[in-house]
Image (cartoon, grey):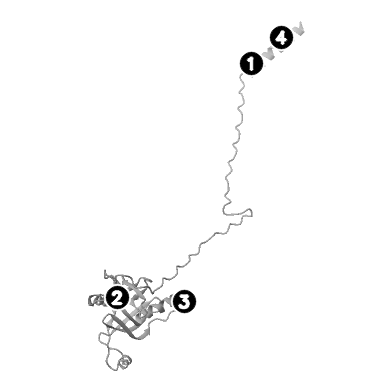
Amino acid sequence: MIFKLFALIVAAVTGLLGLLGMHQPVPKPLPTPSTPTSTPTSTASSDSTGVPAPSTSVTAVPEPLRPVAMDMPAGTHPATKADMSKFLSHNWASTANKYAVIYMGKSQPFDGTEEIKKEFNGNVPEGLRMLTYDPTCNAVQTAVWFDGNTMRTTAWGMQTLRGCQIDVEKQSEEFQTFMKQSDIYFNAAGDRAYLKRTDGKVSEWIIATN
């Protein structure tokens, strides 16, 4: 009888425990941690040692200077009185180097120095003018006059004394060879003047904008 009563008590306790277990909360699974995304590193500017790769630079090569002397183009003619009037009233820039300018439009009538008067036995050429021109290296001042369409100069003097690159200095010297004595020519359109040396070579000039 006692054993039977004990079995009933055990069965009752077991049933009560099972009933209580049905209402226990079910534990939720823990969230899975996300895998961190790695950021790729660029190796374009560094090597395996971490030293930046040397940058490459391009050095500009200066263009060679254009030759001053050229052959006379077709269709030109010796300067007429109208052409010479235009030549005397404008400044002229070289087509070989825009920095070479004959400031003819700024030239002034000149009575001549004692040295010039002595050179011409007191008879200063008619229409003598004091002219400044810049043959790319050092500015030059000279007395200039015209015999028809022929330009002649005398009494040269340097206005500046600056150092120049060898190629610029050589080009400047060539410009001066056209200033000592040249025949003036114009093209048919009248917008280009040509200084013709005694050797037949010419230099080409257009009206300067400065």
> Reading the chain from its start, which is encountered first: label 1 or label 2?
1
* Amino acid carrying mark 3 in the image: Ile
First in sequence: mark 4 vs mark 1: 4
Badge 3 marks a residue whose secondary structure is: helix
Residue 117, given in percent of the width and then of the height, sits at 30, 92
Q: Is residue 15 above or below residue 170?
A: above
Marks 4 and 2: in contact by CB < 8 Å? no
What residue is drawn where x is 22% and y is 75%? 82
Using a 10 Å C-alpha cutoff, classify the residue at mark 2 as few (fewer than 14 neighbours), some (14 to 19) or many (20 or more): many
Q: Which residue is mark 3?
A: 166
The residue tagged with tag 1: helix, strand or loop? helix
Q: Look at 68% across and 12% down and name the residue there.
A: 12
Check disc 4 and report the residue beneath it: 8
- Residues under numbered marks 3 and 4 in contact, where contact means CB atoms less than 8 Å apart: no
Q: Is residue 115 visible?
A: yes
Determine the CA span between mark 1 and mark 2.
126 Å
Task: Name the residue at the left extreme.
Answer: 82
Q: Are marks 1 and 2 in contact (CB under 8 Å)?
A: no
Instruction: Please tell me whether residue 76 is drawn above or below residue 20 in the rendered image.
Output: below
Q: Which image quarter is the C terminus in?
A: bottom left
User: CA separation, marks 3 and 2?
Assistant: 30 Å
Depth order, front residue of 20/182: 182
Return the residue nearer the eye: 189 or 24.
189
Q: Give the labeled residue for mark 2.
A: 185
Distance from Cα at disc 2 to Cα at disc 4? 141 Å
Q: Closer to the observer: label 3 or label 2?
A: 2
Tell me which label, 3 or 4, sits earlier in the chain.
Answer: 4
Res 32 → quadrant: top right
The mark lying in front, picked from 1 and 2, is: 2
Q: How far is the residue under mark 3 from the one under mark 4?
A: 126 Å
The residue beneath circle 1 is: 19
Q: Position of residue 54 (x, y in %)?
A: 57, 59
